Image (tube, rainbow, N blue to C red):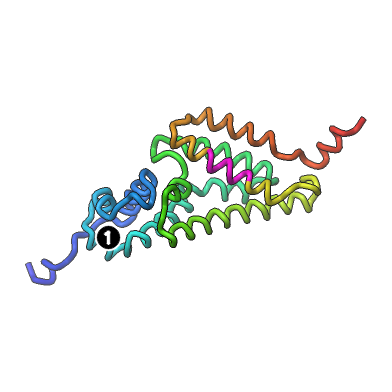
């Protein structure tokens, strides 16, 4: 064996290691997941982690991006595919009830859970920015429905978008606390009853 071969680092499957890091962050949050926790979960040494992923914060950023493209992508799909903001939000909440209680992975939303008790300013800001971007996307979609007449002209667009985000955050925490899928689905249906009716439906209800 040559000296070059002796110095070659142990190889590992990067996507698998990244998935294992995701599970660790998802279960324990950013702040309380140590580098030792990560190397143990990923089955690699600290030097291999730093060489392949950078530091803990850089690894977490890659994990969050991967989560957003996979487990957390249901909301974006709903808003891209459904014809109205109401339909999109209803679908998002129903799919969240399923996703947040799926036994195949940790409960709740990784992005929401990781922010709990996080005291690292850069991570706090990145997670806050992601939540704000989601709220802005919700808000823009709702505004289009107001402009098209699907929703009443006096709809508080910002408050409605924030309401949807608050429900998702609450569902994530309740899932972490042990709520089942049926309980979260019932919560989702209750939340949607607070959604303003389509403008035409409101006019019909008020007609003599």
Q: Residue at x 59, y 46 (%)?
A: 165
Q: Is residue 86 left or right of residue 166?
A: right
Q: Secondary structure at mark 1?
A: helix
Q: Viewer-proximal residue, 108 or 87?
A: 108
For label 1, the residue is 49
Q: Position of residue 172 (x, y in %)?
A: 49, 40
Start and end of the magenta stretch?
A: 163-170
Where, by quadrant of the figure, is residue 90 drawn? top right
Q: Residue at x 84, y 32 (%)?
A: 205
Q: Is residue 2 left or right of residue 14?
A: left
Which quadrant is the C terminus positioned in? top right
Height in image: 81 above or below 201? below
Q: Position of residue 24 (x, y in %)?
A: 33, 47
Q: Position of residue 57 (x, y in %)?
A: 37, 60
Residue 169 belongs to the span the image colors magenta: yes
Height in image: 120 above or below 199? below
Q: Residue at x 66, y 53 (%)?
A: 139
Q: Viewer-proximal residue, 125 or 47?
A: 125
Height in image: 102 above or below 85? above
Q: Is residue 180 left or right of residue 8?
A: right
Q: Viewer-proximal residue, 186 or 125?
A: 125
| Magenta span dominant secondary structure | helix
Which quadrant is the N terminus positioned in? bottom left
């Amino acid at each position: 064996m040559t000296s070059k071969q002796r110095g070659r680092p142990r190889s590992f499957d990067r996507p698998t290691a990244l998935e294992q890091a995701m599970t660790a962050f998802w279960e324990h949050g950013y702040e309380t997941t140590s580098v030792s926790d990560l190397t143990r979960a990923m089955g690699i040494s600290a030097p291999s982690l730093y060489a392949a992923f950078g530091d803990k914060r850089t690894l977490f950023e890659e994990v969050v991006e991967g989560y957003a493209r996979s487990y957390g992508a249901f909301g974006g799909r709903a808003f891209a595919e459904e014809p109205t903001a109401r339909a999109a939000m209803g679908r998002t909440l129903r799919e969240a009830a399923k996703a947040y209680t799926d036994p195949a992975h940790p409960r709740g939303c990784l992005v929401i859970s990781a922010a709990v008790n996080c005291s690292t300013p850069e991570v706090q800001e990145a997670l806050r920015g992601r939540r704000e971007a989601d709220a802005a996307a919700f808000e823009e979609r709702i505004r289009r429905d107001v402009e098209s007449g699907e929703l009443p002209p006096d709809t508080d667009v910002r408050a409605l978008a924030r309401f949807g985000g608050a429900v998702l955050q609450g569902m994530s925490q309740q899932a972490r606390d042990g709520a089942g899928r049926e309980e979260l689905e019932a919560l989702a249906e209750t939340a949607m009853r607070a959604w303003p009716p389509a403008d035409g439906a409101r006019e019909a209800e008020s007609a003599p």
